[in-house]
Amino acid sequence: MKIEISQQALSWFETEMEATEGEWIQFYARYGGSSKLHEGFTLGMTKAEPDEAAVQQDENGIHFYIEERDLWYFDGHDLHVELHPERQEITFDYKKSS
């Protein structure tokens, strides 16, 4: 499994979350809502240092990761993080890992 961050999404993290080099952004499964992969769960994100990072992607010195305990949510899919061009908000897409 891997995490892919678009350049536009990276700029959003740097501006909106004020993420800077050396900081950590966690993607995690949270109860509530609905996603393409699971009814009743959505993906959340927060600034937090990892306990047991299973997947990590570094962009401009910012560390994006998923904890081992949240891998079940992705069900064998890669995470693609994009910026919605009109709403200017982060969107998630999931593509089966090869």
Image (cartoon, grey):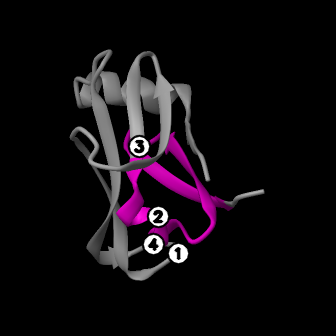
Q: Nearer the viewer, residue 53 or 92?
A: 53
Q: Image quadrant for the C terminus?
A: bottom right
Under mark 4, the amino acid is: Ser
| Residue in the image at 46% along x and 70% along y | 73
In space, the residues marked 2 and 3 are separated at their CA atoms by 11 Å
User: Position of 14 compared to 46: left or right?
Assistant: right
| Residue in the image at 48% along x and 27% along y | 58
Residue occupied by mark 2: 71
Under mark 2, the amino acid is: Leu
User: Of helix, strand and loop, which one carries label 3?
Assistant: strand
How crowded is the residue under tag 3: few (<14 C-alpha within 10 Å), some, or many (20+)? many
Under mark 1, the amino acid is: Leu
User: Of helix, strand and loop, which one carries label 4?
Assistant: loop
Under mark 3, the amino acid is: Tyr
- Of the two numbered discs 1 and 2 in the rendering, the one whose residue sits closer to the viewer: 2
The residue segment tinted magenta is 66-95
